Image: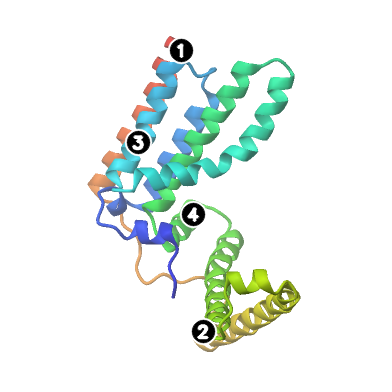
Amino acid sequence: MHHVVLDEWGRRPGWLQKRDARVKLVALLGYLIALGTAPPLALPAAAGFGALAAAGVVLGKLPAGAVALRAALVLPIGLFLAAGLLLGGAALRAGDLLVRSYLSAVAVLVVMGTTPMAGLLRAMESLGVPRFLVVVLHFLYRYLFVLSEQAQHMRLAVRSRGLDRAGLRRCPSLWKAAGGALAVLFARSLARAEAIHRAMLARGYRGQVLWLRAARMRPGDWLFLAVALTLCAAVRVVLAHAG
């Protein structure tokens, strides 16, 4: 099984990784609400919200550069919306939108990078998210691994036959074969997914994800939740209005 980067981060021995996934989701929600409802962000408020996000990166022992680069993936969408504001003469609002979008992406990455996907899904179900949505997300996440695994196997087979990027550039006609290979990839992935589903049914799966053990809240989890929500409220009320 080829683990994604965020899952690898979530299994690091960081302090934030040890906290219950439910409190991290609630803290994230509090952060996003505070950030989204704050007045136009002045420098102190933006620095305060940025410091909270940076504290999450440090507590989770996450690579700051990698988090910063991945959070920047939301900027193209933010730039598109900010361009509309710029055309309307609201340059300050455009910059404010970009800052909020980027900080929100960093906060989401901190939670996802310190919690394995299985823990997030279990926390969502515990917090009252509809079970159907949790099951759909669970299967989507698992079947992405199936698709990735089949793609890597096909890539290895192509390279074993002496084809690489340089070979594709020398033989443009091979791109047509690549289109057929894409169809084969989805067909093989579908067959593999159906085999996995039949194996799950044979093992008693009846439409509900069963967890091996129940999650328990510890004193450190309650303390983290209280401190996180208090800091978010403090930045929202004090720094935002002070700016």
Residue 191, how many percent across, how many down?
Answer: 64, 85
Crowding near the residue tagged with mark 4, few <14, some 14–19, many ≥20 C-alpha atoms within 10 Å: some
**In the rendered structure, which amino acid carries the disc numbered 2?**
Gly
Q: Which residue is mark 4?
A: 124
Gap in Å between the C-alphas at discs 2 and 4? 23 Å
Mark positioned earlier in the residue sequence (3 or 4): 3
The span from disc 2 to disc 3 (Cα, nearest Å) is 44 Å
Residue count near mark 1 (Cα–Cα under 10 Å), binned few <14, some 14–19, many ≥20: some
Spot the residue most to the top: 242
Distance between the alpha carbons at the discs numbered 3 and 4 = 24 Å
Q: What residue is rendered at 34% in x and 48% in y?
A: 63
Say what amino acid the circle numbered 1 marks: His
58 lies above or below 123: above
Residue corresponding to mark 2: 204
The answer to whether the residues at label 2 and label 4 have Cβ atoms under 8 Å apart is no
* Mark-to-mark CA distance, 2 and 1: 56 Å
- Tag 3–tag 4 contact (CB < 8 Å): no
Image: 125 above or below 221: below
What numbered label is drawn on residue 241? 1
Secondary element at image label 1: helix
**What is the CA distance from the residue labelled 4 to the residue labelled 1?**
33 Å
Please identify the quarter of the rendering in which residue 9 is found: bottom left
For marks 2 and 1, give the one nearer the viewer.
1
Q: Nearer the viewer, mark 4 or mark 1?
A: 1
* Figure quadrant of residue 229: top left
Can you give x and y, in whole percent of width and height, for residue 12 in the image?
A: 29, 58
Amino acid on which disc 3 is placed: Ala
In depth, the one of 29 and 152 nearer the eye is: 152
Q: Is residue 169 above or below residue 49?
A: below
Q: Which residue is mark 3?
A: 54
In terms of sequence position, does the residue under pointer 4 or pointer 1 come before the other? 4
Q: Earlier in the sequence, mark 2 or mark 4?
A: 4
